[in-house]
Image (cartoon, rainbow, N blue to C red):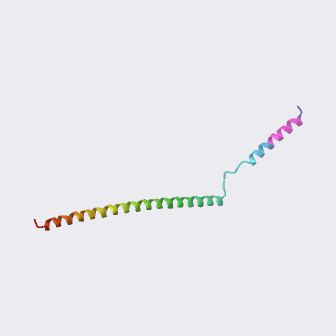
Amino acid sequence: MNVRTIALALSLGLATTVAGYGSMPQDAQSPKQDMKDAGHATKDAAKDTGRATKKTTKQTGHAVKKGTKKAANKTAQKTKQGAQKVEDKTQPQ
């Protein structure tokens, strides 16, 4: 082998190595992109919180409605029972 072949092989190897490092992605983001990412994350968190609040409010509303109906029916039943007792006491025997 002659010196030219070795020199050519080394220079090509060095060139491909340097080109490989130059095309590697950069891990560091710009501060502007960091702020954009933080804004998007905040927006998504607010949406998730809103959905959870809506779901909880709906469930609470249903529970209150069910409890109110149950209490009203129980009250009506006891009122009817009390009225029947009064009627029975006032009836001549």
Residue at the image point whose x is 65% and y is 59% from the top: 33
Residue at the image point whose x is 59% and y is 61% from the top: 39
Residue 11 among magenta residues? yes
Within the image, what quadrant is residue 69 found in? bottom left
Residue at the image point whose x is 67% and y is 51% from the top: 27
Q: Which secondary structure class fits the magenta region best?
A: helix
Q: In the drawing, does residue 55 fall left or right of residue 17? A: left
Percent x, y of residue 37: 61, 58
Residue at the left extreme of this rendering: 93
- The C terminus lies in quadrant: bottom left
Q: In the drawing, does residue 34 fall left or right of residue 88? A: right
Residue at the front extreme of this rendering: 93
Residue sitting nearer the eye, 45 or 4: 45
Percent x, y of residue 13: 80, 40
Residue at the image point whose x is 36% and y is 60% from the top: 66
Residue 5 among magenta residues? yes
Q: In the drawing, does residue 8 fall left or right of residue 63? A: right
Question: Does residue 22 lie above or below 37 as drawn?
Answer: above
Within the image, what quadrant is residue 29 found in? bottom right
Q: Which residues are magenta?
A: 3-14
